[in-house]
Amino acid sequence: MIKTIRTIDRLVKKVLTAFCAIFLLLMVVFAVYNIVMRYVFENPPVWGDLLTVLSNIWLVFLALALTVRDKDHIALDLIYSWLPLKAAFLIHQFWTLVIFCLGIVMVIYGMEAVATMGGKYWEMWYFAWENGQFSFKPNYMPKKYAIAIVPISGVLVCVAAIASICEDVYKLREGTYRRTKETDPEISPQI
């Protein structure tokens, strides 16, 4: 059972990392294309800056879930090193629980924002699912598409926080729990 969960965990991490890499690549491509079109051809696309920013936003929100799962978020590891192991464990789990609650807030208010978001991006075309197939819409992409990443990221953050807590509890019971990731050979990068 644990082996299956770890396999799924690694697969999800690889998929999220791939999406982050794609969004980073898109951000760079859109920015370079926009700069070349603006300064070389003096004819910048109206959508260039918007897609660069949207790629950046989606990248950051997806990377948030990765940082929570990898325990790379802001932590006071120095303070944890001075505390007894169980006290450090409890404080770390408290902060992971706070991050879980942040994920819940992102889901609740993100869904509300998506549902109530008005307005459209006049410079963006988009595809919509209609009558069982994708149809091309020639203009005005709804702004709710851009902020849909907030509840998606909230769900991913919640899952990552739960996975982190479960992993830490399992390691504490096994006697392999460590305060920082540098002492954990399973997480530490191989040289």
Image (tube, rainbow, N blue to C red):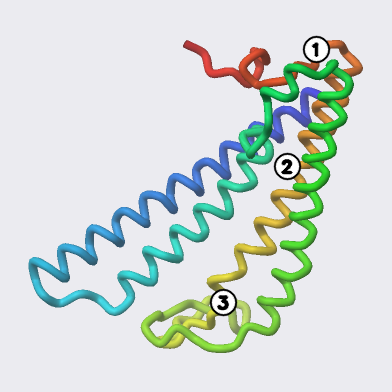
- Element at label 1: loop
- Element at label 3: strand
Residue for point 72% across, 25% down: 79
Residue 86 percent across, percent down from the top left? 88, 20
Most foreground residue, 9 or 104: 104
Q: Which quarter of the picture shows residue 44?
A: bottom left
Most foreground residue, 84 or 108: 84
Q: Which quarter of the picture shows residue 119?
A: bottom right
Residue 149 percent across, percent down from the top left? 60, 63
Q: Which residue is mark 2?
A: 160
**Residue 176 badge:** 1
Left or right: 186 in relation to 82:
left
- Outermost residue, right direction? 173
Residue 174 percent across, percent down from the top left? 88, 13
Res 122 seen here: yes
First-in-chain label (1 vs 3): 3
- Outermost residue, left direction? 40
Q: CA distance from mark 2 to mark 3?
A: 33 Å
Give amino acid for label 2.
Ala
Residue for point 73% across, 72% down: 111
Vertical arrangement, residue 113 with respect to residue 58, above or below: below
Q: CA distance from mark 1 to mark 2?
A: 20 Å
Q: Which residue is mark 3?
A: 133
Residue 15 percent across, percent down from the top left? 57, 42
**Residue 122 badge:** none
Residue for point 29% across, 79% down: 46
Q: Nearer the viewer, mark 2 or mark 3?
A: 2
Give amino acid for label 3.
Gln
Do callouts 1 and 2 mark residues in contact (Cβ within 8 Å)?
no
Q: Residues within 10 Å of mark 2 (few under 14, many from 20)?
A: many
- Element at label 2: helix
Left or right: 6 in relation to 52:
right
